[in-house]
Image (cartoon, rainbow, N blue to C red):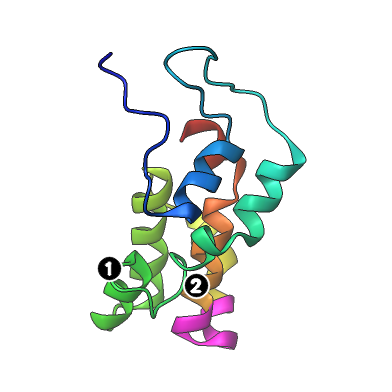
Amino acid sequence: MQLPDTREPRSNGGVLTFLNTFGRGDRDTSFRRSDGSALQALTMMNNNFVMSRVHQNNAGSRVQTLLAQNASPDTIIQQLFLNTLSRPATSAEIAQFSPMFQQQGNRLAAEGLQWLLLNKMDFVFNY
């Protein structure tokens, strides 16, 4: 009975749909599933619940915080890796993503990198 009620959250349909897509079980009749599906991949790539957390205009997003600090591209890359994957970016990854910041500007590049990190296998398997 210590597990949360499976009907929660009642007020946010987006969260409920997101959790159910990822195989959330209930405490009474079915276990949590850990298998993957095409629907899960599509949800991570396109669902409004995920996409709204990637953009700068979402209050409290890591992208918004970093851009408000006028951080350098290298700092943005390092912080997004640390906050999303819990590891620093390698020098090869910094070299790979730095041109994106020069071409697209900090806002678009940071949003794109955050989306990419959320959809990396490292994130999907670990979180």
* Residues rendered magenta in the picture: 100-108
Vertical position of residue 28 compared to residue 37: above or below: above
At mark 2, the secondary structure is: helix
Residue 121 relative to residue 52: left or right = right
Amino acid, disc 1? Gly
Give percent across and percent down for residue 102: 53, 85
Residue 113 relative to residue 70: left or right = right
Q: How far apart are marks 1 and 2 (CA)?
A: 14 Å
Quarter residue 92 falls in: bottom right
Residue 105 covered by magenta stretch: yes
- Tell me the residue that label 2 is attached to: 111
Quarter residue 74 falls in: bottom left
Give percent across and percent down for residue 21: 61, 39
Q: Which mark is residue 4?
A: none
- Tell me the residue that label 1 is attached to: 60
Vertical position of residue 111 compared to residue 41: above or below: below
Mark 2 Cα-neighbour bin, 10 Å: few <14, some 14–19, many ≥20: many
Amino acid, disc 2? Glu
Q: Which of 90 and 43 is in front in this view?
A: 43
Give percent across and percent down for residue 124: 56, 39
**Tag in front: 1 or 2:** 1
Which residue: 37% across, 39% down?
Answer: 8
- Dominant SS of magenta comes to helix
Vertical position of residue 84 compared to residue 25: above or below: below
At mark 1, the secondary structure is: loop
Which residue: 28% across, 13% down?
Answer: 1
Vertical position of residue 17 compared to residue 66: above or below: above
Give percent across and percent down for residue 46: 65, 61
